[in-house]
Amino acid sequence: MKQNVLKIHPDDSVLVALTDLEPGDRVQWEHTNLIVTEAVPAKHKVALQAFEPGDSIMMYGVLVGKAKQAIPMGGRLTTFNVQHATDSYDLHGSSYQWAAPSVDRWQGQTFMGYPRSDGRVGTANYWVVIPLVFCENRNIQVLEDALVHDLGYGRRNTYQQQAQELAALVQAGRSVEEILQADLQTAEQSLSGQLKLFPNVDGVKFLVHDMGCGGTRQDAQALCGLLAGYITHPNVAGATVLSLGCQNAQVAMLQEEIQKRSPQFDKPLFILEQQAIGTEESLISQALRQTFAGLMQANTCVRQPMPLSKLVVGLECGGSDGFSGISANPAVGHASDLLVALGSTVILSEFPELCGVEQELCDRCIDEATASRFRELMNVYAQRAKEVGSGFDMNPSPGNIRDGLITDAMKSAGASKKGGTSPVVAVLDYPELVTKPGLNLLCTPGNDVESTTAEVGSGATVVLFTTGLGTPTGNPIAPVVKIASNSALANRMPDIIDINTGTVIDGDETIQQAGERILDQIIRVASGEVEVAAVRHGQDDFIPWKRGVSL
């Protein structure tokens, strides 16, 4: 008989409803029997004991909240009767012992990647066009209009066909009701089918943003660091950069950040300054000539067999639900542990979503200096949030809460499972470059697009993105593998989901089996054998993080 509830950790005082529970339903977990006192939707939590105001609520073996009012045994936990709470944490030294999983099955296996002169390996081969300041966004758009379709990278938008059909109905005098019920052709974006002029170049990407001037000098420096991370990224063959000339984010600042990340930088890089060149026509014409020359060089790059240790995988979540922490995230965590055991690099970010599990992560750091840096970055971030009247406790979104994640600590305890169990080898501040194999922590906001943008800027060549509600996001230069936490989502939004781990909830697969399946898919994606949904749809989300408070 399929289990209708789950207790995640022996110390937990709540159960997770795996199916909808009705008042009067009898629930049994091991030696405990209880009667559900009110309707509890799937993904929400049932009290395994009676709580009085102030009582601690444990989940994943950690404190995730305290009762604001009495909750009967069998009652539902909500934002009305539970408030966010976490335990304090401290540095305990580095005595963590890790039992690495067996990776015999993947020993000696390779992926087909693009080797770069600095020793890193790409999973794709893109050319990027970047503005140093938002004033150049229009010129970037002009370049995109001139380049993309004629080079064979355009996409056919069949929604235009739908609009034409609707226009014809209006012209024919059809009613509002007939318009609303019109049977239109299925709209699916697909590649234009046009022969690519540069077949070894996966695309030309245009990274527009709203920064570069008008903010703090620290914002400008961070932006240049992020853009340098993309320019030097192993998935990028070269870049065209447009500068106005007078902005805070100066060309010299960008060049300095490039040198930090790649002292022997040798990719084709063209930087054009509009105020020095003059007219728009001169700027665009020169940018086109140089970009074509660069694309000719980029087209000489070809995939070659590379060891799995060259993979750099970002771990991300967005639109999380009450199942994310018991299916998709721990499955990704097992894949993360397999990657680390193979000598690969993984990046866990979203610091507001590590609130409440700091002690575990500190204990997993390889030395006290690493743990101290994690604590410092967490404390500074939390303090900045408080100074503007916010806090990590405000992190859960309405969608998170609706689907069972009612406190930030509860959300964090599940989100951190993406990092598996391996030691933390380094803690990085945004937008630093990852350099050490193993599990790296990167300080970013919980905003999934800002965080994904940052992970790729720090070197992730593939991103694993778990979601319980459905988030149609991607990245311009790194494939984002979308992983559903539940089968209902995978069936409802198959156009954006690449992997379904709802099989774990359904009882058809273990977390370990799902993790192994994820690793196999990573290898296929990294080799260019599988095009993920975000790439297929041209979902190129790019949002730099302003170092104010973004949860």
Image: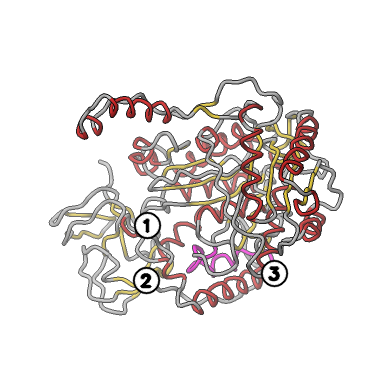
Magenta part of the protein: which range?
351-368
Q: First in sequence, mark 2 or 3: give its number.
A: 2
Q: Which mark is residue 65?
A: 2
| Residue type of the residue flagged with mark 3 | Arg
Does 275 lie within the magenta span? Answer: no
Q: Is residue 353 magenta?
A: yes
Q: Residue at x 71, y 27 (%)?
A: 200
Decide: few, some or many residues near mark 2? Use Cα within 10 Å; few <14, some 14-19, many ≥20. many
Q: Earlier in the sequence, mark 3 or mark 1?
A: 3
Residue toward you, 501 or 282? 282
Residue 168 point in image, percent of width and height: 32, 25
Cα gap from disc 3 to disc 1, whole angstroms: 35 Å
The mark nearer the N terminus, 1 or 2, is 2
Tell me the number on the disc at residue 217.
3
Query: Looking at the picture, how far across and down is residue 438, in whole percent?
Result: 67, 53
Give the numbered dot on residue 400: 1
**58, 41: nearer the viewer:** 41
Q: Nearer the viewer, residue 325 or 450?
A: 450
